[in-house]
Image: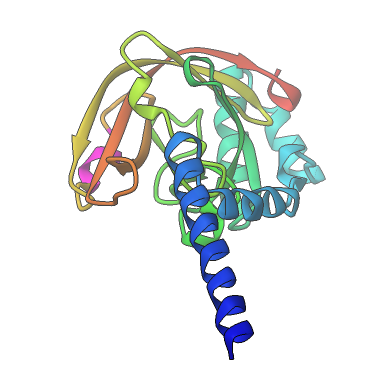
Amino acid sequence: MRRLIRDISSVLIIAGILLVVDAGVTLVWQEPITALIGLIKRGEVDKQYLTQHLNKLDRNALASLRTVQLRIAYLARLDQREVATGAAIGQITIGKIGVDNEIVQGTDDATLEKGPGHYPSTAFPGLGRTVAIAGHRTTYLAPFRHLDSVGTGNTIVLKMPYATFTYVVQYRKIVAPTALYVIRNVGYDRLVLSACNPLYSAAQRIIVFARLQEVAPTGLAA
């Protein structure tokens, strides 16, 4: 009986230590268990849409478009129409906070485990409308953990298969989780980044608004 009590006590002590370590790592970095899951999920991402392969009909239609802007828009619409939920659609880079992640299509729980997710109800870059992307701050590799450090004048780059888009941050705002107006169209190319706020809570959303500054066509759009 004494040995059983001693063994149970040892298990409880070790479990307590592990919980304290987990909490400490989460406070200074990110939640370690979901970080491991995030690494696994990231390796499972479907990347076929990062390279565009057009059929003959689409190639002919693209060839008939005489401006780069029209070709980019055509390819953006094509990608958005065909891409599957959870698949990679491009790359997001935020130099200010060291973000360099693949963007996946969708914002459901399973998709956001893979990385920053594009709101399906918003446009793809290149269509002259709002592009919105959400990401975690403490779990699943926490790509947007330091989103509160991104401010006016900082740049955010979205690299899509058909063009690279550089946005300049306008401002940052804290809103309620129900404030869906932040992803509405505003008459120009806008990027909206969204994450839970404050850290370790989903009581609010931190939103970063940025405006398109430069477009560099690549691939079939060039």
Most foreground residue, 222 or 43 = 43
**In the rendering, at what x and y percent does residue 54 appear?**
78, 42
* Quarter of the picture holding the N terminus: bottom right
Q: Residue 188, located in which quarter of the rendered image?
A: top left
**In the rendering, at what x and y percent does residue 25 appear?**
51, 42
At 50% from the left and 36% from the top, the residue drawn is 29
Q: Give the left or right position of residue 108, taking residue 220 as reference.
A: left
The answer to whether residue 33 is magenta is no
**In the rendering, at what x and y percent does residue 179 appear?**
19, 47
At 77% from the left and 47% from the top, the residue drawn is 48
Q: Give the left or right position of residue 43, taking residue 211 as reference.
A: right
The answer to whether residue 181 is magenta is yes
Seen in the picture, residue 44 relative to 75 is either above or below; the reply is: below
Q: Residue 123, located in which quarter of the rendered image?
A: top left
Seen in the picture, residue 178 relative to 1 is either above or below; the reply is: above
Q: Give the left or right position of residue 197, taking residue 3 as reference.
A: left
Q: Residue furthest front?
A: 2
* Quarter of the picture holding the C terminus: top right
Q: Residue furthest bottom?
A: 1
Seen in the picture, residue 45 relative to 109 is either above or below; the reply is: above
Q: Which residues are magenta?
A: 180-185
Most foreground residue, 163 or 108 = 108
Seen in the picture, residue 151 relative to 145 is either above or below; the reply is: above
Q: Main secondary structure of the magenta part?
A: helix
Most foreground residue, 184 or 193 = 193
At 60% from the left and 50% from the top, the residue drawn is 114
